Image (cartoon, rainbow, N blue to C red):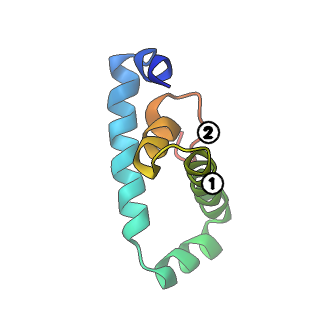
Amino acid sequence: MLRLLASCSATDQARASYQNGLMLWAMNIDVIQRRTLQAKYPAWGKAMSEQFAEIARLDREGLTAALAFELVYACPTTTTWWQ
């Protein structure tokens, strides 16, 4: 895990920080707004669902949700909807 994080460049880490901010913003949107966005932007909804599923999978494997969140967004090798 730590090797994965250490392999990220400073640019990748800055991008991850920005993406984390976007993710936190997305998580704070209430359910009705999320459903509206998902209906209007199906790709966004699908990508968000995939990201949450990946975080949940990592969490089930024993990582804390916070660390799983960091791993999902730490390197550009993960798929994100805004790239």
Q: Kindly indicate whether the residue at mark 1 contacts the one at mark 2 (C-beta within 8 angstroms).
A: yes
Q: Please tell me which residue lies in front, 20 or 62.
A: 62
Q: What element carries label 1?
A: helix
Residue 52: image quadrant is bottom right
Lateral position of residue 65 relative to residue 17, left or right: right
Residue at 55% from the left image edge and 44% from the top image edge: 62
Residue at 38% from the left image edge and 33% from the top image edge: 15
Rendered location of residue 33, percent (x, y): 47, 79
Residue at 36% from the left image edge and 22% from the top image edge: 11
58 lies above or below 2: below
4 lies above or below 31: above
Lateral position of residue 14 relative to residue 48, left or right: left
Mark 1 lies on residue: 47
Rendered location of residue 60, percent (x, y): 61, 51
The quadrant of the image that shows the C terminus is top right
**Residue type highlighted by circle 2:** Thr
Q: How crowded is mark 2: few (under 14 residues within 10 Å), some or many (20 or more)?
A: few
Q: What element carries label 2?
A: loop
Residue 27: image quadrant is bottom left
Q: Please tell me which residue lies in front, 75 or 40.
A: 75
Question: How far apart are the alpha carbons under marks 2 and 1?
Answer: 8 Å
Q: How crowded is mark 1: few (under 14 residues within 10 Å), some or many (20 or more)?
A: some
Rendered location of residue 10, percent (x, y): 33, 19
Rendered location of residue 8, percent (x, y): 43, 19
For marks 2 and 1 on the same chain, the one whose residue lies earlier in the sequence: 1
Mark 2 lies on residue: 79
